[in-house]
Image (cartoon, rainbow, N blue to C red):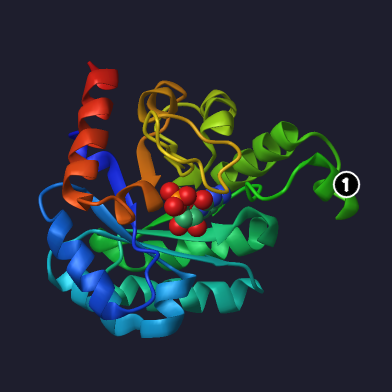
Amino acid sequence: MTARDRLIVALDLPGAEEARRMAARLRGHAGQMKVGSQLFTAEGPSLVRELAGDGWPVFLDLKFHDIPNTVASAVEAASALGVSLLTVHALGGPEMLQAAVEAARRAGERRPRVLAITVLTSHDQAGLARLGVAGTVEECVRRLALLAREAGADGAVASPREAAVVREACGPGFLIVTPGIRPAGAPKGDQARHAVPGVALAAGADYLVVGRPVLSAPDPASAAVAIVAAMEAALR
Ligand code: C5P
């Protein structure tokens, strides 16, 4: 897998026109396009089909969290769209995770890989305690990542700070997808637990998710090229 294959750009944009234009500019400079709840709610599955039809691996980041039967049906629907990665909340529990994994497997060879969300990066320890969740953020991340792995999930989404915890707990082969990437000198925005690309890879990340540092750059393609170059340097 090349460094470019490991770069996922989050298409956090208001509409299909903007998303199409951005994907076209990034052709050849990024590995995957991530469609999240904003774009999906605005434009629906047709845009996902279109991106996949254009040859992009698509990461459908809708963070499913519901009863097992409903999540299994949603995963089946996502598989039919041809997405390569999708997310479910580990907090949905082992039965829900297993139902998601089984539904993805039914899609056969072109099945999407199922990633578990452990603890949202917007939560801190006090926030978790208010929800009645015991332990430190890291203990929770570790517990939920292990739960996901035991249920057969392909990997987890983890901040750069948590990637090492997940790698250590779940071993090699468990995919780690890391948002919160900020190239050296870029504005951090609301990402409290951010890291430069090389640090995230060194912590064990397989894929990096980058949104605003690419989307808001004067030239998104050169921003992506610079991130891939930093990744290549770190992988050498
Ligand atoms: O713009 P930025 O690079 O911060 O975008 C990061 C992307 O990763 C966004 O689409 C965001 O929803 C997603 N994400 C995140 N933190 C998580 C899970 C997903 O930032 N824990």
| Residue pictured at 60% horizontal, 41% vertical | 145
Kind of residue at disc 1: Ala
Query: Which residue does the image show at 27% across and 28% down from the upper left?
Result: 231
Q: Nearer the viewer, residue 74 or 12?
A: 12
* Whether residue 211 can be seen here: no
Where is mark 1, residue-wise?
A: 129
Identify the residue at the far front of this view.
218
Circle 1 residues within 10 Å: few <14, some 14–19, many ≥20: some
Q: Residue at x 17, y 55 (%)?
A: 26
In the image, 24: left or right of 82? left
Q: Secondary structure at mark 1?
A: helix
**Residue 224 image position (x, y, % from top left):** 23, 43
Q: Residue at x 79, y 34 (%)?
A: 136
Q: Is residue 224 left or right of residue 215?
A: left
* Residue 110: quarter of image: bottom left
Image quarter of the N terminus: top left
